[in-house]
Amino acid sequence: MNITKSLSAFEAASQLIPGGVNSPVRAFASVGGTPRFIKEGEGAYLIDIDNNRYVDYVQSWGPLIFGHKDESIEAAVIDAVKHGLSFGAPTLAETKLAHEVVSIYNSIDKVRFVSSGTEAVMSAIRLARGYTGRDDIIKFEGCYHGHSDSLLVQAGSGAATFGNPSSPGVPADFTKHTLLATYNDIESVKKCFEQSHDIACVIIEPIAGNMGLVPAHKEFLAQLRELCDAHGALLIFDEVMSGFRATLYGAESITGTTPDLVTLGKVIGGGMPVGAFGGRLEIMQQLSPEGPVYQAGTLSGNPVAMAAGLAALQKLKQHSKLFSVLQKRATRLVEGMKAAAMEQGIVLQTDVRGSMFGFFFNTTPVHNFSDAAASDLEMFAAFHAGMLEEGFYFACSQFETGFICSAITDTMIEETIEASKRVFERIA
Ligand SMILES: *Cc1c(COP(=O)(O)O)cnc(C)c1O
């Protein structure tokens, strides 16, 4: 595969942009190799500037559930652009999108739009703190909630400790209010509640996608709900990734646990920058200008972004069978790859939730971050490079989730499995 143009583009970008990228994971640092510079997307395909075509299992890290250049989203965006890019005043599109979100999510009575998932989570946590009048929060090791200061924490010595900053530039004073617990381990959460009587909220990815795909156990979420209620803390589901990806009606509809607040992003913007947070009425009423908790944004509810999101959600609602179709394809993909790996003596742990799929190069099941971290990263890197060479674009880290879009056909899935056989044969 000729990647001459990507090689020189990456070199030029690296002179001007730190690491050559505007979001670190794009740099291929954990798998080696050079990121492809993309000139175009087309349905299931990415096309790089050297004219190589790849079946895309990343889909902009989640947002593009209908694939690249979806006609109805594209038309909605073009129409919105013609009326102006931004007004800083209310538009009808905001109410329409809010109506969709509120009618889809049982737990959401009111919703506020922002421009990224990071903003959505940061604001939801401020709201939880304002509403409860408490400072501390509990998050789980391996869950990602955007790059705001108090959420960039790593485990201290042992789980259930106050977190240490995971990045220079984050004062320990900011992260000392963040307690870290172990995913799917209710005892570790109980310890946090014993350690602090000032817990405003527990935030969790109910279907974790940022340590690879690791869904929370139903029972665990039910116990979390009970603990939060017993201690007067709010439960926040961060569904920036899983929202409109795992199922239409949110993790609450498949886990049976109802959160107090939900954060959304990715699919909700249809490929444009949109985030959102919403929840119970009396909590959302605390938000400025209705209440005292401040939150704002110059481009929040941007009309072009709202148009894209609205087109995406309306299309999702019209295709009621979409999630089961995508789940079938995702399941066939990971089952096929698992069998292909097995033929070469390589063990994969796989899982699927709707259009999200995950596979770990790991001999034991993965329930939390330390399980995920024990995966064979060298093997993953070799797999990633091999598949890329074959024309299949997988996320460039073992700790990311794969995405099936509606433009991916059964034939493409079978071709992916065939290619994986060749790759596993080479790397075993
Ligand atoms: C992507 C993601 C975020 C951050 O969203 P951005 O739009 O990248 O700021 C937050 N939480 C989860 C669960 C995510 O997957």
Image (tube, grey):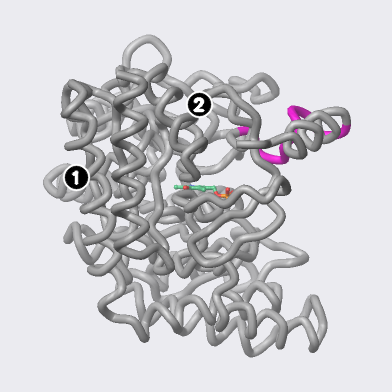
Q: Amino acid at mark 1?
A: Glu
Q: Earlier in the sequence, mark 2 or mark 1?
A: 2
Tell me which corner region of the image, top left, top right, bottom left or bottom right, holds residue 167: top right
The verdict on label 1 being within 8 Å of ligand 1 is no
Q: CA distance from mark 2 to mark 1?
A: 34 Å
Circle 1 crowding by C-alpha within 10 Å: few under 14, some 14–19, many from 20: some
Numbered disc in front, either 2 or 1: 1
Note whether 400 is above or below 287 in the view shown. Answer: above
Mark 2, residue position: 153
Q: Quadrant of the N terminus?
A: top right
Residue indicated by mark 1: 335
Sort mark 2 into few (<14), some (14-19) or many (20+) by Cα contacts within 10 Å. Answer: many
| Residue at image point 35% right, 22% down | 426
Q: Position of residue 148 (x, y in %)?
A: 61, 39
For this rendering, which residue is in front, 4 or 233? 4
Residue 63 image point, x, y percent? 51, 60
